[in-house]
Image (tube, helix red, strand yellow):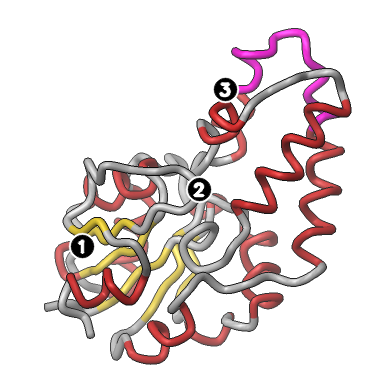
Amino acid sequence: MYDAVLFDLDGTLIDTESIALTTGLAAFAAHGHDVDDAFMHALVGKDEPTARDIIRAALPHADLDAVNRHWRDGFAAGVDAGLQLKDGARELLARAGRPLAIVTSTGRVGAHRKLAIAGIAGAFAHVVTLDDVTAPKPAPDPYLLAARLFGIAPDRCLVFEDSETGAEAAHRAGCTVVQVPDVVPSQGRWAHHLAPDLLTGARMARLI
């Protein structure tokens, strides 16, 4: 049914969204901005420029450079302390039986760093990052590029995503989408299969 399997990274394969949420809340609070979980959830799955625009619209007088420095330092420390794989991730990578790729809204340096720390870099034939496209998720471009790198049609790709933004991108590209929500619940508007965990999603999509 599928010639390749494509994975989002943050919140899908590795548990970084919880780190981003905790360190983000701390960064905003340190600079006098009392934001809540709902505000932070609106940033999940967004590339950095888009997230910055959302923050600027909500907090027009905030010193975003100072907040971002605080947040980056806190997040980097959290990542350096070690990254946990999401439930079933290692087993799914081993059992997928297809060429694998990462499709992430993280920049190239950050994506490869996370993959190395998580110990799964060697599993992937390609890593498509924010730096590789001009239109990031929810545009279909990152997933279209991944399919093109494999030389296959997008409808031959199975995608695992956690966020609405990522699921929309994969759906618009014409891929089959398994969505496994992380910190933000979802009704699976853009998903072909909405699953509680990676292995259940893989079974629903008849990958394993």
How far separated are the C-alphas under marks 2 and 3?
Answer: 19 Å
Cα–Cα span, label 3 and label 1: 30 Å
The earlier-in-sequence mark between 2 and 3 is 3
Q: Amino acid at mark 2?
A: Val
In this figure, which residue is indicated by the disc labeled 1? 154
Image vertical order of residue 10 relative to residue 117, above or below: above
In this orientation, which residue lies closer to the viewer: 18 or 58? Answer: 18
Q: CA distance from mark 1 to mark 2?
A: 27 Å
| Residue nearest the observer in this picture, 196 or 23 | 196
Classified by dominant secondary structure, the portion drawn in magenta counts as helix
Q: Position of residue 67 (x, y in %)?
A: 82, 30
Relative to 50, 153 lies left or right: left
Q: Foreground mark, 1 or 2?
A: 2
Q: For the magenta stretch, what is the residue range?
A: 54-67
Q: Amino acid at mark 3?
A: Ile
User: Is 58 inside the magenta-drawn segment?
Assistant: yes
**208 or 69, which lies in front?**
208
Q: If the image is split into quadrants, where does the C terminus sit?
A: bottom left
Where residue 140 sits: x, y (%)? 31, 46
Mark sitting earlier along the chain (1/2): 1
Q: Label 1 neighbourhood size at 10 Å, few (<14), some (14-19), many (20+)?
A: many
Image position, residue 6 (x, y; %): 35, 69
SS for callout 3: helix
Amino acid type for the residue under numbered disc 1: Pro
Residue placed under numbered mark 3 in the picture: 54
Label 2, on which residue?
A: 183
**Is 14 positioned to the left or the right of 70 in the image?**
left
Residue at horizontal 78%, vertical 59%?
Answer: 78
* Element marked by disc 1: helix
Displayed quadrant of residue 36: top right
